[in-house]
Amino acid sequence: MAKHLKTGQFGEQLAYSFFTECGYQILNKGWRHGNWEVDLIASKNNVLHIIEVKTKTKSDYGFPEDEVSFSKINYLISAAEIYLKLNPQWERVQFDVLAITLEPKVSYFLIEDVYL
């Protein structure tokens, strides 16, 4: 497996632990439906959280959150629409980005309620 894929998988494992420790209930990890994929789907305080996880080994060439583009947010919105059709009980939805940098020590930067 390519190094960047291993880094991404490791980041998603760290994100799972991060959100669990922060009191979120993880509903889906790596949710897929057709061509759609969301890293984490969680709930907290009756809010559905659609979470994009970005992980980089170092921030020498930019921060992980810099990799979340306008088109990626649009993609997440489209994926969330499908998820909500399958799970219509949710009234509130929030899009979050968790940026993880691994070196020199693991650091987390949570951007909550991302808007376009």
Image (cartoon, helix red, strand yellow):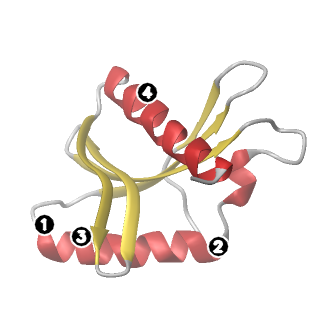
Residue beneath disc 3:
83
- Position of residue 11 measured from the top left corner of the image (x, y, whole percent): 54, 39
- Gap in Å between the C-alphas at discs 1 and 3? 6 Å
- Position of residue 41 measured from the top left corner of the image (x, y, whole percent): 31, 51
Q: Secondary structure at mark 3?
A: helix
Q: Amino acid at mark 4?
A: Phe
Q: Is residue 62 left or right of residue 39?
A: right
49 is higher (above) or lower (below) than 44: below
Q: Amino acid at mark 3?
A: Tyr
Pointers 4 and 2 in contact (C-beta within 8 Å) = no
- Position of residue 19 measured from the top left corner of the image (x, y, whole percent): 38, 31
Q: Amino acid at mark 2?
A: Phe
Q: Is residue 59 left or right of residue 38?
A: right
33 is higher (above) or lower (below) than 109: below
Marks 4, 1: nearer the viewer: 4
Pointers 3 and 2 in contact (C-beta within 8 Å) = no
Q: Quadrant of the C terminus?
A: bottom right
Residue beneath disc 1:
87
Marks 4, 2: nearer the viewer: 4
Numbered mark located on residue 18 in the image: 4
Q: Secondary structure at mark 1?
A: loop
* Residue 109 vs residue 4, the one in the foreground: 4
14 is higher (above) or lower (below) than 39: above
Q: Secondary structure at mark 2?
A: helix
Of callouts 4 and 3, the N-terminal one: 4
Numbered mark located on residue 70 in the image: 2
Kindly identify the residue that appears in the image at 26 percent across and 77 percent down. 82
Pointers 1 and 3 in contact (C-beta within 8 Å) = yes
